[in-house]
Image (spheres, helix red, strand yellow):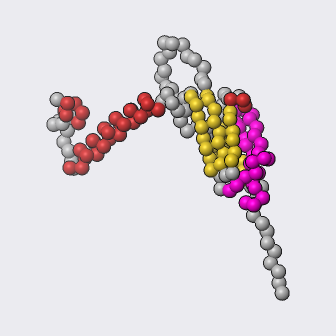
Amino acid sequence: MILRRITGWPTRVLTSPFEELENIRRQMDLLTEGLTRSVLRETTAGVFPLMNITEDKNNYYIRAELPGLRADDIDISVTGDSLSISGERNLPVEEEKAQYHRREMEQGKFSRIVNLPSQVDTGKAEANCADGILTVVLPKAAASKPKQITVKTS
């Protein structure tokens, strides 16, 4: 009875011996996805914040989307060649009997650590938050900046 309910057997006709293995794999994926989603939902806010990292000759620029967060809700730290952004995003409380039709916005503590390609001058780092976008400017360390070498002729 259970086998019939899960797989549709014996009413389903298999065209290949590997089709049933594929069906079992799909069922296991659904099972594990459901278990991990319920466990992780309360402890994480997903991959948040979304970031863009760019550079020019002198600086790295990190732009992160942090809608609804105030500047004092964000913790930023820089060490050597890594940047850490952490904080907590809280959403407005819905009424107790609210029925969700779609729930994509998550709340909770978040932390992102990004490794940069080279060392930065941590003493000159700057951060600004405007319109939900955090912009961090990290000057490259003098040792990691490219140096122009002139070629001498004899």
Total numbered labels placed on residues in the image: 0
Kindly identify the residue that appears in the image at 18 percent across and 36 percent down.
9
Indicate the quadrant where residue 38 lies. Answer: top left
Q: State left or right for residue 70 relative to residue 112.
A: right
On screen, residue 149 above or below 118: below
Residue 17 location, x and y as percent? Answer: 20, 49
Residue 63: in magenta span = no
Kindly identify the residue that appears in the image at 78 percent across and 47 percent down.
123
Q: Give the range drawn in magenta.
A: 118-145
Indicate the quadrant where residue 90 lies. Answer: top right
Q: State left or right for residue 74 relative to residue 11.
A: right
Regarding residue 142, the answer to whether it shows in the image is yes
Residue 122: in magenta span = yes
On screen, residue 25 above or below 38: below
Q: State left or right for residue 57 relative to residue 112.
A: right
Regarding residue 53, the answer to whether it shows in the image is no
Observer-nearest of 26 and 82: 82
Location of the C terminus (image quadrant): bottom right
Observer-nearest of 76 and 100: 76
Observer-nearest of 103 and 61: 61
Kindly identify the residue that appears in the image at 83 percent across and 84 percent down.
153
Residue 87 location, x and y as percent? Answer: 63, 32
Outermost residue toward the bottom in this view? 154
Residue 28 location, x and y as percent? Answer: 32, 39
Kindly identify the residue that appears in the image at 73 percent across and 52 percent down.
120
Residue 63 location, x and y as percent? Answer: 69, 42
Location of the N terminus (image quadrant): top left
